[in-house]
Image (tube, grey):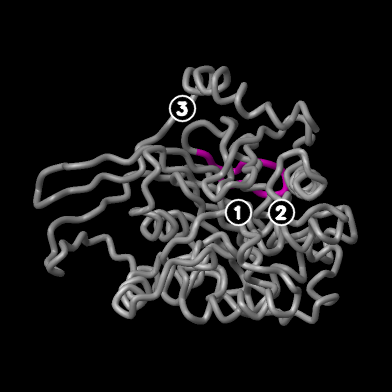
Amino acid sequence: MKKRRHQYFYWCRAGLRAERKKMRTAKLFEEYRGSILECVHSGMIVVVDEKGPVASLGDADFMCYYRSCSKPIQSLPVILRRLDEKYGLTEEETAMFSASHFGDAYHIRLLESIMEKTGLSEAQLIMRPIYPDREKERISLLKRGFPPRKLYHCCSGKHLGMMLLSRELGEEVEDYWRPESRTQEEILQVLSKMTDVPAGEIRMGLDGCGVPVYAVPFQKIAVSFLRLQCPDLIEDERLKEAVERNVGMIHKYPDTIAGENVICSILSKDPDILAKSGAAGVYAMGIKSRRIGIVAKVLDGTHDVYGQLARHILLRLGYDTAAVKEIERHYPDTIFNSNGQPAGERRAVFSFSGI
């Protein structure tokens, strides 16, 4: 494990240059202000079924960090050890371990309840205090003179889950973030099973929230989301049961993993689909009825096109559901300025063949 602790520094120096040389991209979106092309977003998309890739744009095998797309997997060791049952957590509270929450009052109540039931403290979280991602919540707190908190961080639920696991494994709770810890090793082993990538070949970096983040060949992210939605493909019976329980809780309480009217929560209202965003342009989905997993990467790292990206991928796959239509209402192709005036549009310019 000491070797793994330092690996990401080597990979950041030596690996990135090699990855850039072989990386193939495709044009995904054009942005127009009036009639003039203003921005172009390029990236990659891979769709897999249980036999392998069925459609791809760009490089399907470049090493890609999951970022927060990994949260429904990082939370699985907690479910495997049934720590939710040990501490009497509700399904709604347990779903927060997979969340990139927007810091709504609803989320904070759930997180505070988790801490009360488990005896964990906010002070043990390693991230710095911030204000919520949700603008109205942030403005309300500032107007009332409330200070920032660690719980407002979008990753605080994930961290509480890791802290529980750390304590269960007999480690110092405050060390839950360390790459060499048993906590992170257990997460790594689960990720290996979900992707079929040997643990020694999974590459490690430091995520924005301070815990390890893992990179695998791009298409393997799609494989893991296929298995999250189709756990019958998982050979390990205990892991299969844990995935069924974990994803079932997310579908039962979809607003936990992001928030009301946020794309991941909108899509995950439908138990046929699981959707999760990550930082730096990564978006992943699994569709049970189609038995496919999907991953997309916007190479410039923007979050601005996530809604359109997910919707247009699904539409090009012939998947047009009520959830997809709801995304269009909240994330239209029209670009509005700060005064609410139409100023331009985003045009999806990619297509799949052979599907």
Q: Is residue 76 left or right of residue 340?
A: right
Q: Which label is found at residue 126?
A: 1
Q: Which of the two labelled residues, at mark 1 and mark 3, occupies the earlier sequence position?
A: 3
| Pointers 1 and 3 in contact (C-beta within 8 Å) | no
Q: Residue at x 32, y 50 (%)?
A: 348
Q: Which of the two labelled residues, at mark 3 and mark 2, occupies the earlier sequence position?
A: 3
Q: Which of the two labelled residues, at mark 1 and mark 2, occupies the earlier sequence position?
A: 1
**SS of the residue under disc 1:** loop
Disc 2 designates what residue? 174
Tell me where residue 135 sits by quadrant: bottom left
Tell me where residue 4 sits by quadrant: top right
Residue 65 placement (x, y as % from top left): 57, 40
Q: Residue at x 41, y 65 (%)?
A: 131
Q: Amino acid at mark 2?
A: Glu
Q: CA distance from mark 1 to mark 2?
A: 8 Å
Q: Is residue 44 left or right of residue 38?
A: right
Q: CA distance from mark 3 to mark 2?
A: 41 Å
The residue segment tinted magenta is: 47-56
**Depth check: 83 or 350 in front?**
83
